[in-house]
Amino acid sequence: MAGPATSLAARPAAAAPRGQSDPVWLKWTLLTVALAFLALFLVVPLAAVFTEALRRGFGAYFTAFADADALAAIKLTFLAAGIAVPCNLVFGVAASWAIAKFNFRGKSVLITLIDLPFAVSPVISGLIYVLMFGAQGWLGPWLHEHDIEIIFAVPGIVLATVFVTFPFVARELIPLMQAQGNDEELAAVTLGANGWQTFWHVTLPNIRWGLFYGVILCNARAMGEFGAVSVVSGHIRGETNTIPLQVEILYNEYNFVAAFAVASLLALLALVTLALKSLVEWRAHRATE
């Protein structure tokens, strides 16, 4: 009797997952909606950018990049990102380590300040720098006396880029470090390791994939930033125009092929960013298995 009873008791349990599974039509409906949304707002715009960029052939496409102003915009974009990303990397690691590993007065204020660029419009952040460093700003007269240019110059673009991108690394690392706790660091200190050794051999290996992920997002935002950079740049051709600003100028001049050609570079950078993001997520998933 025990055998049949056990068999009968097991049947509802085995059938339960089948009864609780979602209908097939619901799965395919959601999948279709998601794919249609991606096609409409991602694939089609990307295809349009490359189609317009290559409308007159590869000769006209590459000619757009031979222009002196376009080359200057590309160099300035990489320069701003090359400065902003390492600065935010150092800040993000330091801030997330302090927030996740220590308790101190003003901790919640620091977390709020890290999120500030997410809440403030990039245009507003650019105006703040103009108010501080502009000719009529708080520090403007002193900067003019010492022949220091920030607004309408490269330093202003770098500062604006740093401001709008500094949350990305910290925001990726803070929850990761909080979830890991500090038991391993305490064990390393107990065994005689100093602070640098603890960070290099214990903390960094545990956060490396989250760190790479934050750097990728930070770099993508730095290269594509428009609002804050537009306010502080002054749109000086060949000097303070980044790639997004150069695209705007070319488009306003009805130079559509060149505009879409330069825009395609940003699109390619975005695709590379997505590929790196997927690779990091895959490696991080494998590392946790």
Image: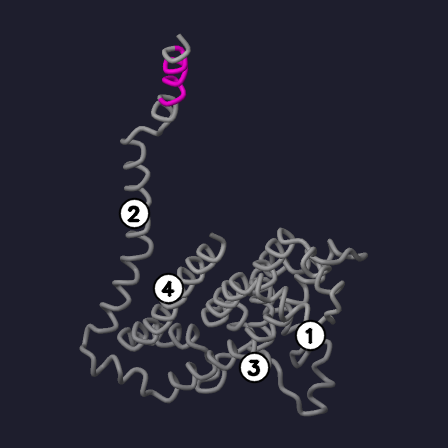
Mark number displayed over residue 152: 3
Mark number displayed over residue 90: none
Q: Alpha-carbon distance for marks 4 and 1?
A: 39 Å
Viewer-nearest of discs 3 and 2: 2
Viewer-nearest of discs 4 and 2: 4
CB within 8 Å, label 4 to label 3: no
The residue that appears at 35% across and 29% down in the rendered structure is 22
Ranked by sequence position, the earlier of labels 4 and 3 is: 3
* Mark 3 surroundings within 10 Å by alpha-carbon count, few (fewer than 14), some (14 through 19), many (20 or more): many
Q: Secondary structure at mark 2?
A: helix
Given the current orientation, which residue lies at the most extreme top position? 1
Ranked by sequence position, the earlier of labels 1 and 2 is: 2
Residue 6 within the magenta-colored segment of the rendering: yes
Viewer-nearest of discs 1 and 2: 2
Residue position for label 1: 132
User: Residue 56's x, y, as percent?
Assistant: 18, 76
Q: Identify which amino acid the numbered label 3 is placed on.
A: Phe
- 182 w.r.t. 31: above or below: below
Q: Alpha-carbon distance for marks 4 and 3?
A: 34 Å
Residue range (magenta):
5-14
* Mark 1 surroundings within 10 Å by alpha-carbon count, few (fewer than 14), some (14 through 19), many (20 or more): some
Q: Identify which amino acid the numbered label 4 is placed on.
A: Ala
